[in-house]
Image (cartoon, rainbow, N blue to C red):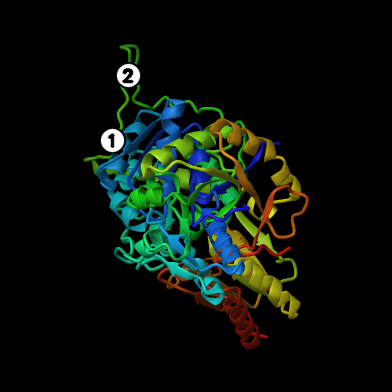
């Protein structure tokens, strides 16, 4: 068993990335994810890697674009306003079919917003974010251990499908400290015959590009990419179910909201309300099937979010609006309390007997 | 901890538990009947701060001096003038909670001339050997040297605050005593105490901590 250490969520991301073979990090400081950059700045020089603080987020994401094209495992991290700045580059990376990890430790918005935790970049993360037809694989950790595990998973998925992936955390997950076990060894390096590594005059040169002036070719490329997305939707959905076996009501929450909700579910059970929790771990692909099945037996859903209500739309789509879905939310850096979630469950149960 | 110094300066690697130690130490001094103030000098991390314990401190009658915008959304690294009321006025005891690492310790350097001139302080290095960048005595020593370089004050004592958060047991702490001893030998400094959560027994030279409650302390339901 690997030894346990006490880590901040942000540090766990950074160390897990190193364990996953990432030796190149480009970033720009912003609260509440600056510890990722600080950790990389300390560790990378000691292990022969490169930490580079770019002059802006735009610059950092384009460095990621270049390095991903050369076939290396690479990441950048930021928080909400910085992630908005990176969107053009992310779209280019998706358009050039490159694997890379983008970490978003969300804070309240819109605009500069605040520095406290939020989940209000859900739409941006799961619906594309930048321009054009594309998706990111979006992973949502709910513990410091998962910050580490899902970082490694995100690199593996990125390489497997040649897509950019996003770890979508929030300020609480980034700042809280918990014991973590980091794996000693991780995934084998993946062959990347498409990478621009120099031909040595022995093969045809590779091209990394997202520009297709021929519309037929661009459409074909998009169709092919969406075939891969279909595979991802079939193979890579991750979620956790809690007390769903006999549940009559279902709470849906991810990340920090899921931890709060779990306490509320336990408290509601003590009061005799049969309620369970579905925690999406992949936000894209969204766990559509499990929610669809849940809609067959439960009387209603609660979506708990640190936003004005974004995931709630995906719940309504997945369940085809067959059951009421109510929102329990806080915004701007505030976190719903277990009592708030419990009250929402109780009201839902009262109105949908 | 027999002879009380007038100032206790708490510095160390970020996330080592400095703020928690500082708050508990201030409560201890106050409980001994000493006029105690606590200073939050952390202007690098806006998330975990002394001000989280404002209520406890106020109830205990301990004056809290913290950056004007601490715990708000304004991330402004400005130090309050009242800090001089602790550093220069010598009519009270003070606990100074310094920011993490060398970056956090730069702010302390501004007060170094007054502190060194009075020479009635304990400069404490807080070590948690379960933190990934200070897993060995040698790594902890490196962080110590970086902090000293930044604030121009040399450490005078070691506090062993090794813990694994909510999973801390007696064994967790005891298995780090050797490393703490090694750090004392490497640095030539005495061990001030081993900090332990209340309920953990059989640790020598221990100092009990009343842990702070935070809004993100969301207990996992079993």
Foreground mark, 2 or 1?
2
Residue shown at 32%/51% (left/top)? B110
Which residue is under mark 1? A209
Which residue is rendered at x = 26% and y = 46% of the image?
A56
Alpha carbon distance from label 2 to label 1? 16 Å
Q: Between A300 and B126, which is closer to the camera in this rendering?
A: B126
Q: Quadrant of residue B153?
A: top left
Pick the front one: A148 or A140: A148
Find residue B190 and report its horizontal and vertical position in percent: 60, 41
Q: Chain of mark 1?
A: A
Task: Tell me the SS state at disc 1.
Answer: loop
- Which residue is nearer to you in this view: A241 or B32? B32
Q: Position of residue A323 (x, y in %)?
A: 58, 77
As drawn, which residue projects farthest toward the left? Answer: A213
Q: Which mark is residue A283?
A: none
The chain to which mark 2 is attached is A
Which numbered dot is residue A198? 2
Q: Is residue A99 visible?
A: no
N-term-proximal mark, 2 vs 1? 2
Q: Residues within 10 Å of mark 2 (few under 14, many from 20)?
A: few
Please determine whether, in this image, residue B85 is positioned above or below residue A1. Answer: below
> Label 2's element?
loop
Asked if labels 1 and 2 touch by Cβ distance under 8 angstroms, the answer is no
Q: Residues within 10 Å of mark 1 (few under 14, many from 20)?
A: few
Residue A301, x across and y down, in percent: 59, 74
Q: Is residue B143 above or below residue A259?
A: above
């Amino acid at each position: 068993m690997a030894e346990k250490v006490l880590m901040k969520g942000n540090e766990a991301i950074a160390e897990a990335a190193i364990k996953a073979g990432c030796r190149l990090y480009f970033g720009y400081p912003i609260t509440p994810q600056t510890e990722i950059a600080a950790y990389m700045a300390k560790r990378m020089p000691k292990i022969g890697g490169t930490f580079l603080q770019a002059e802006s987020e735009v610059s950092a994401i384009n460095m990621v674009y270049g390095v991903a094209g050369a076939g290396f495992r690479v990441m950048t991290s930021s928080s909400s306003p910085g992630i908005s700045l990176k969107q053009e580059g992310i779209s280019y990376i998706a358009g050039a079919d490159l694997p890379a990890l983008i970490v978003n430790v969300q804070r309240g918005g819109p605009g500069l917003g605040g520095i406290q935790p939020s989940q209000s970049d859900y739409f941006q993360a799961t619906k594309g974010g930048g321009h054009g037809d594309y998706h990111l694989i979006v992973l949502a950790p709910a513990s410091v251990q998962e910050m580490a595990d899902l970082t490694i998973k995100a690199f593996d998925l990125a390489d497997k499908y040649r897509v950019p992936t996003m770890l979508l955390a929030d300020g609480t997950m980034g700042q809280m400290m918990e014991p973590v076990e980091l794996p000693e060894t991780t995934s084998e390096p993946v062959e990347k015959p498409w990478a621009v590594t120099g031909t040595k005059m022995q093969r045809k040169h590779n091209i990394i590009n997202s520009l297709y002036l021929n519309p037929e070719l661009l459409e074909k490329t998009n169709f092919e990419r969406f075939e891969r997305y279909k595979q991802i939707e079939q193979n890579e959905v991750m979620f956790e179910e809690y007390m769903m076996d006999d549940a009559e009501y279902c709470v849906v929450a991810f990340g920090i909201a899921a931890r709060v909700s779990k306490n509320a579910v336990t408290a509601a059970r003590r009061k005799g309300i049969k309620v369970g929790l579905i925690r999406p771990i992949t936000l894209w692909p969204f766990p559509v099937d499990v929610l669809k099945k849940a809609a067959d037996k439960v009387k209603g859903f609660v979506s708990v979010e640190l936003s004005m209500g974004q995931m709630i739309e995906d719940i309504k789509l997945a369940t085809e609006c067959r059951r009421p879905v109510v929102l329990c939310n806080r915004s701007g850096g505030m976190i719903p309390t277990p009592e708030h979630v419990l009250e929402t469950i109780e009201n839902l149960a009262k109105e949908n007997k | 901890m027999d002879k009380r110094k007038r100032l206790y300066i708490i510095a160390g690697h970020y996330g080592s538990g400095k703020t928690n130690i500082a708050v508990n130490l201030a409560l201890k001094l106050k409980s001994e009947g000493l006029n105690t103030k606590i200073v939050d000098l952390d202007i690098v991390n806006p998330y975990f701060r002394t001000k989280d314990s404002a209520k406890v401190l106020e109830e205990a009658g301990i004056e809290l001096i913290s950056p004007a915008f601490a715990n708000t959304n304004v991330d402004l690294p400005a130090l309050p003038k009242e800090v001089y009321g602790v550093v220069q006025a010598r009519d009270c005891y003070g606990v100074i909670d310094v920011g993490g690492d060398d970056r956090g310790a730069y702010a302390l350097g501004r007060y170094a001339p007054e502190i060194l001139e009075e020479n009635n302080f304990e400069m404490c290095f807080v070590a948690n050997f379960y933190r990934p960048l200070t897993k060995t005595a040698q790594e902890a020593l490196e962080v110590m040297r970086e902090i000293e370089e930044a604030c121009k004050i040399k450490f005078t004592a070691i506090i062993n605050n090794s813990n694994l958060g909510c999973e801390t047991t007696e064994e967790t702490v005891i298995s780090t005593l050797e490393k703490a001893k090694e750090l004392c030998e490497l640095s030539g400094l005495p061990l001030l105490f081993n900090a332990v959560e209340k309920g953990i027994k059989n640790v020598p030279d221990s100092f009990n901590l009343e842990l702070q409650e935070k809004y993100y302390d969301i207990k996992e339901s079993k």
